[in-house]
Image: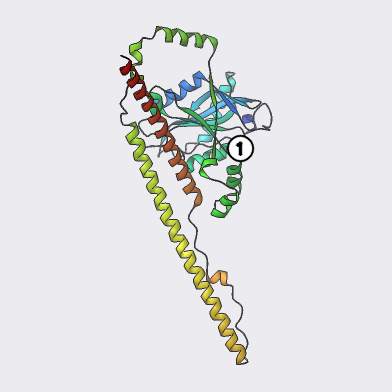
């Protein structure tokens, strides 16, 4: 069975942006149409169902705009290929591109998603590694299911500065996240994307649009919801179940912590009473003890995993909202056309 390692950046000087240190965050992404076609082609060739495909993004930074001009996929390899060096592969690819005078600067990575299921700890760790090594790095999320329905789904995300600081300090405790005011809604920031084509390609697309017939577009008016809504709701319910399990874990942790605090308080009271009795008898007080070693607090459940689950639930809700709003718009339009006729 083919496996895929988590992508990691190649931290070399050759990957640095030619524009110097980025003083402000990336505010816009300009991606070549050919790069979009390569990403789509990569999924069509290697992606099967929920199989995730990943690759490297190449380009350069111009002021606050990130221009993505090329990409190449991560090769699939089996578990037997234990000696496969992914970093060495990336270096060889970028060296080959440089020899043929093609943009070879590393500016991020891309991956496909299955019904919007991409908010995970693996993506968080990978994007942190990229963004920590290459400040302007982004991750492109390509949704082949939405694209197959006639609407290209390609979104770019970066980690927010607050989350970057938390990841650097590796303080994922509830107190650390609360102090940094980190919630699921401010973990990732979406960067707007502009797809750029040359004038010749734009003229060709315009010519193809003029030659296309109405019969080729009848699927856009299809009122059936197929299984997209059903699958999205099923995935949403699964994530809600995961959230419920995390709530149960947190409630158990709260009960155990409260019980331990009560035991600690009772122990201290008994020690004080015994010292008072010993003092009345003229005896020496009991030696001081380190209570923190006797009553070690229970380990709190990982807060970051809960935030990621909440972020994924929010993403599913947004997908359902977009899908239902489009279907409702088609229904209202069909009703208006029927009433007009």
Give the position of the N terminus as an image quadrant: top left
* Residue that mark 1 sits on: 133
Quadrant in the rendering for residue 333? top left
Q: Residue at x 36, y 24 (%)?
A: 332
| Residue located 30% across and 29% down the image | 226
Q: Quadrant of residue 164?
A: top right
Let me know if residue 260 appears in the view: yes
Give above or below for 258 relative to 198.
below
Q: Residue furthest front?
A: 339
Which element type, helix, strand or loop, lies under badge 1?
helix
Q: Position of residue 307 (x, y in %)?
A: 49, 46
Question: Which residue: 48% across, 55% down?
Answer: 301
Residue 133: image location, x then y, percent = 61, 37
Q: Is residue 117 visible?
A: no
Q: Is residue 77 above or below residue 336?
A: below
Q: Depth check: give the residue in front, 232 or 145.
A: 232
Q: Nearer the viewer, residue 260 or 320?
A: 320
The image position of residue 160, as x and y in percent, is: 58, 39
């Amino acid at each position: 069975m083919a496996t895929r390692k988590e992508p990691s950046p190649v931290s070399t000087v050759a990957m640095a942006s030619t524009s110097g240190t980025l003083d402000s965050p990336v505010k816009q992404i300009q991606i070549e149409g050919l790069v979009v076609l390569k990403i789509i082609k990569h999924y069509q060739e290697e992606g099967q169902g929920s199989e995730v495909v990943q690759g490297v993004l190449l380009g350069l930074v111009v002021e606050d705009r990130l221009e993505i001009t090329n990409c190449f996929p991560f090769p699939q390899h089996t578990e037997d290929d234990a000696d496969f060096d992914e970093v060495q592969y990336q270096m060889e690819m970028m060296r080959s591109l440089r020899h043929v005078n093609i943009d070879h600067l590393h500016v991020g990575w891309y991956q496909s998603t299955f019904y919007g299921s991409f908010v995970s700890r693996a993506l968080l760790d990978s994007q942190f590694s990229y963004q920590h090594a290459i400040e302007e790095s982004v991750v492109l999320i390509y949704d082949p299911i939405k694209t197959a329905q006639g609407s290209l789904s390609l979104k770019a995300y970066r980690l927010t500065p607050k989350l970057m600081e938390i990841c650097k300090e590796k303080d994922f405790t509830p107190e650390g996240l609360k102090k940094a005011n980190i919630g699921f809604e401010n973990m990732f920031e979406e960067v707007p994307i502009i797809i750029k084509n040359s004038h010749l390609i734009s003229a060709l697309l315009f010519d193809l649009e003029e030659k296309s017939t109405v019969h080729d577009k009848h699927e856009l008016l299809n009122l059936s919801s197929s299984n997209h809504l059903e699958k999205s709701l099923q995935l949403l319910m699964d994530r809600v179940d995961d959230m419920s399990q995390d709530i149960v874990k947190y409630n158990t942790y709260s009960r155990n912590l409260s019980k331990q605090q009560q035991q600690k308080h009772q122990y201290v009271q008994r020690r004080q009473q015994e010292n008072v009795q010993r003092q009345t008898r003229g005896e020496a007080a009991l030696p001081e003890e380190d209570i923190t070693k006797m009553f070690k607090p229970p380990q709190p459940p990982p807060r970051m995993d809960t935030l990621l689950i909440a972020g994924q639930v929010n993403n599913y809700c947004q997908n359902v909202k977009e899908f239902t709003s489009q279907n409702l718009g088609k229904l209202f339009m069909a009703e208006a056309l029927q009433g007009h006729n």
